[in-house]
Structure formats: structure tokens, C-alpha cells
Amino acid sequence: LLASVSGGAETLRGGGGRQGVSFPVLSPVGTAVITDRPTFRWRALSGASSYVVNVYDRDFRKVAASAPQAGTEWTVARPLGRGQVYSWHVVASREGQEVTSPEQPAPEAKFVVLDDARAEELSRARQVYKDSHLTLGTLYARAGLLDEAESELQAALREHPRSRVARGLLRSVRALRGSKR
């Protein structure tokens, strides 16, 4: 699943930008998402007045676009197709110029929306294992939900700071996403 959305994890954080100008896209990048209406997040570009998010399907057809945003996150209004791979980028307006992230030669920021069966399975698991961060973190990681897996495994470590299992799983998830955290 993650092979369809990965590509040079070290450079997925955003392009080099013109004249040293850059800002990273944060999420979803190189991961699966359970919701069909994901929230896109990026870091602010100094001096930017607005941002526009564009979302594309596998054939690079634009399937969603935001209105100009003042903030650094946007949730798509209409559901995206389940089981589909998407890419996205943000265009910042700054002093009359547009700056795009990620910018080539950086790989595209890609993600996959889980199919209905997998999303339903994880929704049930969330109810059954709501008190077990370690179990949920493991299930999320296996499904490719790296953001959720990392969050649950961090919570498991807060509850059990000496847990080698939680620490090892967290390291594995971070390695999958190329995180340096």
C-alpha cells in the first residue's frame, strides 16, 4: 500500500523553492488516510498572504482545489474516492509571486485513501481497542496510517516509558516515513 505513495522520503518535505524560498508540506505525505475528507497541512511561508491547495488523482486530473486560505491547513469539502491514490501541492502567494510546495525535483506529496472495507475494519478496532495505544498503533501501522500509528505509539510510550516494544515499533514507523524525529 505504501509503495504506491512513497518516493524519496528525504525529499518529500517540500521543494527547494525559488531563490532559497521554500516551505514544507506536512500531511498527508507518503501515508494512508482513513477519512475520505483529509485535512492537508503545511508550514507557513514567511510573508505569504494566502495558500491554495490542489489535489490530483493518479492520472493528474485535478479533483479538488481550495479557495485561497490564510491558514496552514485545509479540509477537502467533497469526499475523495476510497482506495485511490492522490497527490497534492500548495501554492503560496507572496509579494505577487507564487511559490509551490513540493517543488520539483522533490517527489510529489502522495497519499492513499483507505478502501471501505479497511476503513470499516479499523473503525471497529478503534472501538474494541480504544484503551490500548500499542494495539491501535500496530493496527494503524499495518494499514499504512503512519500519522495515526505514530500518535498512538507515542501515547503508548507516555503510558509505559520503558516499553521496548512500543519504542521499537515507533522507530519502525518513523523509518517508514523517513522521519528524523
Image: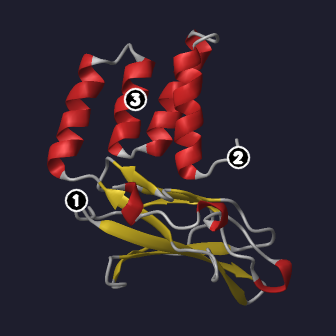
Image coordinates of residue 74 in percent, x first then y, are: 49, 60
Which badge, 3 or 2, is on the more N-terminal residue? 3
Please, which colouring scheme is shown? secondary structure
Image coordinates of residue 70 in percent, x first then y, are: 63, 66
Q: Which residue is mark 1?
A: 82
Determine the residue located farthest toward the left in the rendered image: 117
Amino acid type shown at disc 2: Lys
Quarter that holds the N terminus: bottom left
Residue 138's label in the rendered image is 3
Amino acid type shown at disc 1: Arg
> In terms of image quadrants, where is residue 9?
bottom right
User: Distance between the Cα atoms at labels 1 and 2?
Assistant: 30 Å
Residue at 75 percent across and 73 percent down: it is 22
The label nearer to you, 1 versus 2, is: 2
Residue 22 sits above or below residue 9 on the image: below
The label nearer to you, 1 versus 3, is: 3
Image coordinates of residue 36 in percent, x first then y, are: 29, 55
Determine the residue located farthest toward the bottom in the rendered image: 96
Between 158 and 62, the one lying in front of the other is 158
Residue at 80 percent across and 77 percent down: it is 21
SS of the residue at dot 3?
Answer: helix
SS of the residue at dot 1?
Answer: loop
Which badge, 1 or 3, is on the more N-terminal residue? 1
Q: Is residue 71 left or right of residue 2?
A: right
Residue 52's label in the rendered image is none
Can the viewer see residue 154? no
User: Distance between the Cα atoms at labels 1 and 3?
Assistant: 22 Å
Amino acid type shown at disc 3: Thr
Between 164 and 22, the one lying in front of the other is 164
Q: Decide: marks 1, 3 in contact (CB < 8 A)?
A: no
Disc 1 crowd, CA 10 A, few/some/many (<14, 14-19, 20+)? some
Image coordinates of residue 71 in percent, x first then y, are: 62, 60
